[in-house]
Amino acid sequence: MDYLLTDEQKMLRDMAAKFTANEITPVAAEMEKAGRFPHDILKKAGELGLMGITLPEEYGGGGMDSVGYMLAMEEIGKGLASLVLIMSTHISLAAGSIHKFGTDEQKQKYLPDLCSGKKVGSFSLTEAGAGSDAAGLKTRAERRGDTYLINGTKQFCTLDPDCDNVIILFALTEPELKTKGISAFIIDKSMPGWRVGKKEHKLGIRTATTSELIFEDCEVPAANLLGEENQGFKYAMIALDSGRIGIATQALAVAKASIEAATEYAKNREQFGKPIAALQAIQWMIADMNTEYDASWLLTYRAALMKDQGLRFSREAAMAKLKASETASFCADAAIQIHGGYGYTEDFPVERYYRDARITRIYEGTSEIQRLVIALNSMK
Amino acid sequence: MNIFVCIKQVPDTEASLSVEGGRKVRESGLKWVISPYDEYALEAAIQLKEKTAGSTVTAITVGPARADGVLRTALAMGATAAVHVETDSELDHHAIAACLAAAVRSCGEPDIILAGKQAIDVDAGVLPLFLAQVMDLPAASGVIAMEVTDGLAKVEREIEGGARERIEMALPCVIGATKGLNTPRYPSLMGIMKAKKVEVKKFTPAELNVESLEPALLLESLSVPEEKAPGRVIEGEPADAVRELVRLLRDEAKVL
Ligand SMILES: Cc1cc2nc3c(=O)[nH]c(=O)nc-3n(C[C@H](O)[C@H](O)[C@H](O)COP(=O)(O)OP(=O)(O)OC[C@H]3O[C@@H](n4cnc5c(N)ncnc54)[C@H](O)[C@@H]3O)c2cc1C
């Protein structure tokens, strides 16, 4: 698809591919098995500008467009899918929200350290009782003079406590207003009263730590309110539109890695006296995988391009995320089929792709919620 | 310091190549990169610039319009200027060296010129020395370590048998870099965006007054080597297998 891309987009993609081949792929399987958070990789990524790809140059960002971001994330995800979750949460949901809704002081204070990778951004919306129905959250933020007092427990936050965290937190400032009473806050490590609870043990994407966050009388300066009071839910939905391009890209990465592994294997594995790639049954799987992948890539590219052109892209981002995540599962499944029994073992990477693919249909809106978004936006 | 680095665009090492019309590599669908040895030269040039305040690194390439890509990458890695000698002609190494020399002179007096010891497309391995000859400069190729101080380049070059030769040359000189000289950096995103704003100077060979591009060397034909027959495993007891191996080497392969 090079003919659709600018020189800078291709250069960024090639750099990310090289970085992945040298720094990520060789350690991916072992890190994922151990569930070790990729501190070193993020540090190096920060030095190359990969932690602030789309943020403006004045804050130390790369000033790159969303298409370039998509290409870079896909390359990185082919090495280790977890990294795309961490980096897209960091870039699109955390830094992106501060850039879009924050004050000048907030931008000066947080964006340079986020862009360099010194600080790592998280986004905490989900609670035990508020998943797909994110507006059902219960965490409270009560105004006390110059501070807000926060109490509540957040679920499933992509966050590792050994980082210098910056969290975009959503809490109720006016409970009786429900959705219209949710506000967003910027939480950092200097604020006492929050801690990490249970760490989840997961099927896949294990290097991207998932934590419960507990807030007990956590004092947040009023200066750390993000944007206007009671506008938080709107901000979350806007951030998630961009986030979905990131998750679509993570899914594309897993699909592509599955296709590459399966193609290579099919050419080399011989049964009945010839490579299995010569069998039509295998060729049809390869054909379907590639077709699904290309369709997903083009949908994601469209969403990214629309974002770059300043158009509304909620519907298109939801389509990209829906299609790409289902394609990732399809391709990883077919890749295991093509590998036969070997694909089910840890000796080949496809079992990891299969596990990593699964989550992309759940977070940042399940496939069902994407369909809801697509339908509502298509019937307007 | 006025540092120059000569880089060539070549097909990606992982590209599968095919021949078109008996004399050319088929270009459609190929991915192009900086020749890996040139990356060592580029990295050495940038490190030298970083060590010596006020230095410039000018990257130069000779080739068709598409070769512009390697200059963008060089700028993204840290080169400060770029010159493209644009030509669609098939040049031999004498003509390429003449173009490079003219391009260097068009930018002023060089302190040092670096290049890869060879380009991984045709692997001729002559360019750094041809360039030095055209410019009447001292040269060393296959350089695996280097230090530049007080108008001197102290280099080590790899020679047969893994031995190393230590050479001192007065600047300006030409250096052909090899693997092991350094670890080339990645072009950073900041570098990529900065490179976008740098204007690449473009010349045709005629504009640089390169007199003759007539090749002294003519490429007759290009072909893909025939696929090697797969190896054979001789089964059986070791003693029998060895006997069979010797028989095959003598009677079939006729090497004994
Ligand atoms: C590894 C991981 C990382 C995560 N990271 C973060 C993070 O960083 N920040 C954050 O805030 N959250 C995060 N999440 C939370 C994630 O976004 C939610 O899990 C997700 O939105 C689904 O919510 P739920 O798990 O409560 O499922 P539920 O909402 O309980 O859904 C259960 C099922 O019901 C279906 N369903 C629910 N409502 C509807 C409906 N209206 N129509 C049709 N079907 C419906 C769902 O599609 C699903 O199939 C993470 C989750 C995981 C597993």
Image: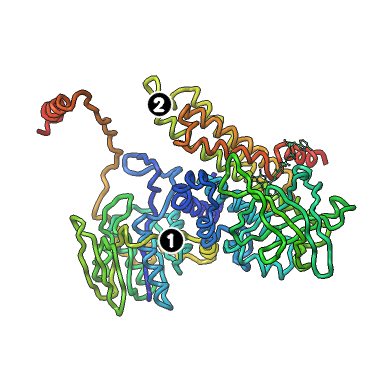
Q: Residue furthest bottom?
A: B150
Figure check: A375 above or below B12: above
Q: What colour-coding does the image apply?
A: rainbow
Figure check: B33 above or below B212: above
Q: Residues within 10 Å of mark 2 (few under 14, many from 20)?
A: some
Image x and y of residue A165, in percent? 64, 60
The secondary element bearing badge 1 is classed as: loop
Numbered mark located on residue B185 in the image? 1
Q: Chain of mark 2?
A: A
Horizontal side of residue A100 vs B215, given as left or right: right
Q: Quadrant of the C terminus of chain B?
A: top left
Residue at mark 2: A275
Whether residue A7 is visible to the viewer of this picture, yes or no, is: no
Q: Residues within 10 Å of mark 1 (few under 14, many from 20)?
A: some
Image x and y of residue B183, in percent? 38, 60
Amino acid type at image mark 1: Arg
Tally the marks. Answer: 2
Horizontal side of residue A259 vs B235, given as left or right: right
Q: Residue furthest top?
A: A272
- Residue lying at 84% horizontally and 64% vertically, measured from the top left: A143
Quarter assignment of residue A200: top right
